[in-house]
Image (cartoon, rainbow, N blue to C red):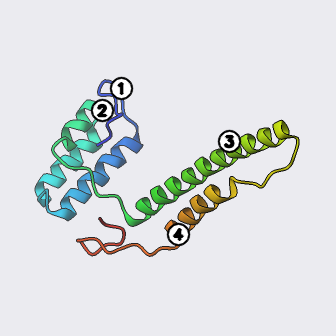
């Protein structure tokens, strides 16, 4: 379930809800039958500590992330790459500026080419359609 769940600490409703969601997903996927799901759900609602809750879900795999969660992760990574681009732009511009000051003349802005190529790749990633995965879902590899 949640790797950060401390086994000795009392759990809150949020942790119980997470375990119930995991159990429901396991029932939907056919990993649990109805009686086992009902038994584990009842025990999850009665659980007081992380250890009790973890024991109910330890043999279940984590559910696959939803399309929305995958899209959020992709957007977060894409925006992070733009932050790297901005950092590169600042560093390259500083080098260009220092070189101009050293030469006492305004030279051509050489960072334009690497930054332009990098930005073009980032834009292409955003607009390029994703391929279909083996399971028929978008974005699979």
Q: Nearer the viewer, residue 125 or 54?
A: 125
Label 1 SS: loop
Residue denoted by label 3: 91
How far, Cα to Cα, is label 3 from label 1?
Answer: 46 Å
Q: Nearer the viewer, residue 23 or 39?
A: 23
Residue 37 at x, y percent in the picture: 17, 54
How far, Cα to Cα, is label 1 from label 2?
Answer: 6 Å
How far, Cα to Cα, is label 1 from label 4?
Answer: 47 Å
Residue denoted by label 2: 50
How far, Cα to Cα, is label 3 from label 4?
Answer: 24 Å
Question: In the figure, is residue 62 to the left or right of 94?
Answer: left
- Per the rendering, the mark at residue 9 is 1
The quadrant holding residue 129 is: bottom left
Residue denoted by label 4: 124
Residue 87 at x, y percent in the picture: 64, 44
Around disc 3, counting alpha carbons within 10 Å, would you say few (fewer than 14), some (14 to 19), or many (20 or more)?
Answer: few
Proximity of marks 2 and 4: CB atoms separated by less than 8 Å: no
Question: In the figure, is residue 134 to the left or right of 86?
Answer: left
Proximity of marks 1 and 2: CB atoms separated by less than 8 Å: yes
């Amino acid at each position: 379930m949640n790797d950060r769940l401390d086994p000795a600490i009392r759990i809150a409703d949020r942790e119980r809800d997470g375990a119930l969601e995991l159990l429901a997903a396991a029932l939907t996927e056919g990993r649990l039958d109805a009686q086992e799901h009902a038994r584990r759900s009842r025990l999850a609602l009665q659980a007081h500590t992380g250890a009790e809750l973890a024991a109910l879900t330890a043999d279940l795999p984590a559910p696959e992330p939803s399309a929305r969660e995958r899209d959020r992760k992709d957007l977060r990574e894409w925006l992070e790459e733009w932050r790297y681009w901005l950092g590169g732009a600042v560093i390259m511009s500083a080098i260009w500026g220092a070189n101009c000051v050293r030469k006492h003349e305004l030279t051509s802005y050489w960072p334009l080419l690497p930054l332009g190529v990098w930005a073009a790749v980032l834009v292409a990633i955003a607009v390029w359609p994703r391929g279909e995965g083996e399971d028929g879902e978008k974005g699979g590899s």
